[in-house]
């Protein structure tokens, strides 16, 4: 099954988010992969050559055995994470496409994308196999800072969003946070400057010695005020109040469009406390309420959302959550995956990306 949402900027240019899944869970992995790739190629053909993929993520059920079979395609930055789709299939694919983008693979493995007047830097599948989670996080962020500085950027000035995939999130998340906090403090990201929109979630790499993996997205050459922190203090407190360092959401304004990146958001109140412990339905409603408050704070609405990723801690909650999302978001691409949230009391978390015309 393929679901695509096309968004139009004021210039008439478009971008699209697509989630591709498989209908038949009885197929082998190779058959499911073939189905996804056939749908992807049909999508590319239908959208035309001017719509260019700039980032994609594979969600796998068994990365160790499945990743070697994925197509070797350097078309854009690619993230691969073991976060099994909870419809009992073996894989799903999210693709972000931008009209008239120019994509190039750089020598360090990152990808440069020229689009709507800026250079965008995508990093997919970064990891430090064999390192403990604290040092892995510290080294990865430091390496990203160095790469951005080579291109006249920095984490502080350029990095819009990260995704952190922690192999054992219940045990190692605190060390990941410790490494991130130390890197941020050294690089000038503080409560008085800014942090980065982020999702820190359970997720495994094919290399089981990688305690944590990271994807990142940055924009070079942003002017002061072009990238903004988005908060909804009536619903969500600043994350630094409970010892972590990320923005609830970040918006970026361009001449013809604005983007909004909503971080992983759960059922939490403005004191940092879990709301509706043990109740998946009520946690889902509160999560939606929190995300909606961030959208409104940035002058966005649900109609601007291009894609949603939903993370569930307990696979047994999938039938309930799947029905709720199908009813609430019938035309928005989304995928529901198994990925424990960083605090055990949270049963569900979601993130999303949105765009509206400037």
Image: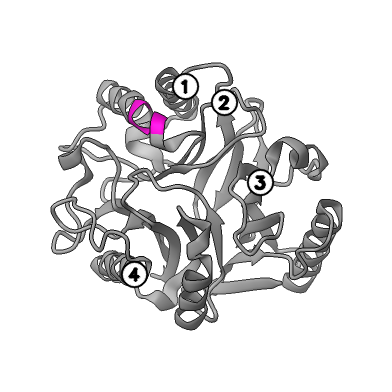
Please give left or right for residue 184 compared with residue 21 in the image: left
Q: Residue at x 80, y 59 (%)?
A: 32
Per the image, is 199 magenta?
no
- The span from disc 3 to disc 1 (Cα, nearest Å) is 28 Å
Which tag, 1 or 2, sits closer to the chain's start?
1
Report the Cα–Cα distance between label 3 and label 2.
Answer: 28 Å
Residue labelled with disc 4:
288
Marks 4 & 1, CB-CB < 8 Å contact: no
Q: Which mark is residue 136?
A: 1
Marks 1 & 2, CB-CB < 8 Å contact? yes
Residue under numbered circle 3: 103
Can the viewer see residue 72? yes
User: Magenta segment range?
Assistant: 171-175
Of residues 124 and 172, which is closer to you in this image? 172
Q: Earlier in the sequence, mark 3 or mark 4?
A: 3
Q: Is residue 27 left or right of residue 111?
A: right
Find residue 210 and name its label.
Answer: 2
Task: Of the two numbered discs 3 and 1 on the same chain, state the one appearing first in sequence.
Answer: 3
Residue located 32% across and 66% down the image: 279
Quadrant assignment for the N terminus: bottom right
Towards the viewer: 215 or 81: 81
Badge 1 crowding class, 10 Å Cα cut-off, few under 14, some 14 to 19, many 20 or more, is many
* Image depth: mark 3 or mark 2 in front: 2
Asked if the magenta segment contains residue 172, the reply would be yes
Determine which of the numbered discs, if any, sits on residue 262 in the image: none
Residue 197 x, y percent position in the rendering: 36, 47
Q: x and y percent of residue 234 in the render? A: 13, 64
- Badge 1 marks a residue whose secondary structure is helix
> Depth-wise, is mark 3 or mark 4 nearer the camera?
4
Is 75 rendered above or below residue 167?
Answer: below
Helix, strand or loop for disc 4:
helix
Rendered location of residue 43, percent (x, y): 75, 69
């Amino acid at each position: 099954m393929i679901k695509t949402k096309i968004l139009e900027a004021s210039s008439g240019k478009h971008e699209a988010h697509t989630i591709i899944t498989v209908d038949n869970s009885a197929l082998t992995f190779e058959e499911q992969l073939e189905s996804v790739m056939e749908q992807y190629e049909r999508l590319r053909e239908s959208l035309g050559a001017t719509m260019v993929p700039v980032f994609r993520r594979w969600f796998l059920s068994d990365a160790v055995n499945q990743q070697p079979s994925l197509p070797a395609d350097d078309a854009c930055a690619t993230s691969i994470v073991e976060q099994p789709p909870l419809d009992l299939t073996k894989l799903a694919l999210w693709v972000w496409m931008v009209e008239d983008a120019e994509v190039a693979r750089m020598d360090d493995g990152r990808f440069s994308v020229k689009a709507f007047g800026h250079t965008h830097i995508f990093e997919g599948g970064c990891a430090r196999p064999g390192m403990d989670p604290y040092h892995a996080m510290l080294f990865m962020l430091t390496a990203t800072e160095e790469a951005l500085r080579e291109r006249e950027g920095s984490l502080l000035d350029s990095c819009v969003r990260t995704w952190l995939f922690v192999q054992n999130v219940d045990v190692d998340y605190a060390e990941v946070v410790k490494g991130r906090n130390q890197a941020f403090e050294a690089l000038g990201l503080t409560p008085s400057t800014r942090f980065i929109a982020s999702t820190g979630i359970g997720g495994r790499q094919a290399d089981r010695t990688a305690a944590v993996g990271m994807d990142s997205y940055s924009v070079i050459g942003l002017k002061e005020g072009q990238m903004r922190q988005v908060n909804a203090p009536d619903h969500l407190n600043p994350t630094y109040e409970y010892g972590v360092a990320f923005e609830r959401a970040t918006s970026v304004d361009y001449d013809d469009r604005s983007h909004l990146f909503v971080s992983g958001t759960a059922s939490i109140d403005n004191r940092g406390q879990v709301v509706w412990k043990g109740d998946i339905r009520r946690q889902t409603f509160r999560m939606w309420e929190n995300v909606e408050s961030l959208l409104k704070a940035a002058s966005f609405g649900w109609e601007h959302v291009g894609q949603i990723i939903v993370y569930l801690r307990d696979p047994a909650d999938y039938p309930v959550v799947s029905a709720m999302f199908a009813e609430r978001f019938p035309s928005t691409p989304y995928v529901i995956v198994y990925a424990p949230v960083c605090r055990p009391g949270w049963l569900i978390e979601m993130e999303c990306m949105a765009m509206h015309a400037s």
